[in-house]
Amino acid sequence: MQLVLTEDQELISKTATDFVTGRSPVSRMRALRDSADRVGFSRELWKEMAELGWVGIPFPESVGGAGMGLADLIVVVEALGRNLAPEPFLSCVGLAGSAISLVGNAAQHAEWLTPLVQGERLIAFAHSEAGGRYDVRRVQTRAVPDAKGFRLSGTKVQVLDGHVADAFVVVARTSGGEADEAGIGLFIVPASATGVSVQRQTRVDSRNAAIVQLSDVAVPPERVLGRAGGEAAALDRIIDRATIVLCAEMLGGMSQAFDLTLAYLKERVQFETVIGSFQGLKHRAARVFMEIELSRSCVMAAARALDEGSVEVSKLVSLAKARCSDAYVLAANEGVQMFGGVGMTDEYDIGLYMKRARAAELSFGDAAHHRDRWAVLSGY
């Protein structure tokens, strides 16, 4: 398996890095946070990213996408992660877009994916529920059939970018018990539908999420994705794809946190000596570098395995997420430590990466969860 970028991917990476560096410095995220911006990101910038073709990278050409793979998308997301850019790639592309692309029919692709790819519509993925922890199949939201389709009732939490979504892909249960594999379905619900209530939340990393309450919401047959009650396996694939996208963002974040730390080690003077010359700090920096490079290989392997349809996808996704969770937290924590007292102040960016590392670590399963999943999948 190739673990280096192709020539085309190198070009995409450079373009994305230059664009994000120039248009989305970390100071922009700070300004959005400090002003309590009602959107939490820039719709104009999101539209520009769509016009550059980034949003459509993993989607078919029939809906205006590029028909490329996750291995191409992750180089863009890594660039976004370096500057903590808050645009909704994970929620709209990695989650909701993947769900519609994988499970939807041609009519649903045309109705929902085409405007998503064009940057004109935002779609969020509503799957997490209180008490579910990392079990994606623990679903209590009910989809009760009636003469006109289904009626959905339940509460979803941690719906990424749900406060500005035009529609939701909702995971609901048509039958079975709370954790049963059978009975899980995917439904498209417009945010304007009667019975939908959205409460915005702001997470510790200043990213946006929402609580979405569904009260007897009508869903016609044309808004049911795939087989009603038969999409548990598809849900697993969707979460795996989103996890790779998140890992790519984490890779960018940990790389930038490390670069910030190296720059500080080269300029901070103590006892008339640059602290980067201290052997103890060199050893710690070397360890962080190795963990980042190991994470990079794991993320690339997982993305390419998914694009190739490998049977090892789930194992490689868990390997990548476990590695990235540990490495991002390590890079951020070590950065704060090496910055010393100023590392604890909001004035320095390293603390922002620590907060993002903590939130990302717990998204889609922490390192311990994915090590256990990898062991189970490996037959241990």
Image: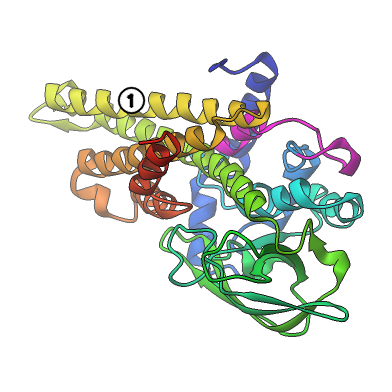
Residue 283 image point, x, y percent: 19, 23
Where does the image place residue 147, in percent across and percent down from the top left?
A: 87, 81
Is the stretch drawn in magenta largely helix, strand or loop? helix
Q: Nearer the viewer, residue 237 or 274?
A: 237
Q: Quick check: can you spot residue 45?
A: no
**What is the quadrant of residue 272 in the picture?**
top left
Horizontally, is 68 left or right of 329 in the view? right
Residue 317, magenta (yes or no):
no
Report which residue position mark 1 lands on.
289
The local secondary structure at tag 1 comes to: helix
In percent of the image, x 73 and y 59: which residue is there? 122
**Left or right position of 156 against 104:** left
Residue located 87% across and 36% down the image: 61
Please provide percent x and percent y for residue 36.
53, 69
Q: Which residues are magenta?
A: 59-79
Residue 78 located within the stretch drawn in magenta: yes
Residue type pointed to by label 1: Phe
Q: What residue lies at 74% left-to-right and 73% top-to-bottom? A: 191
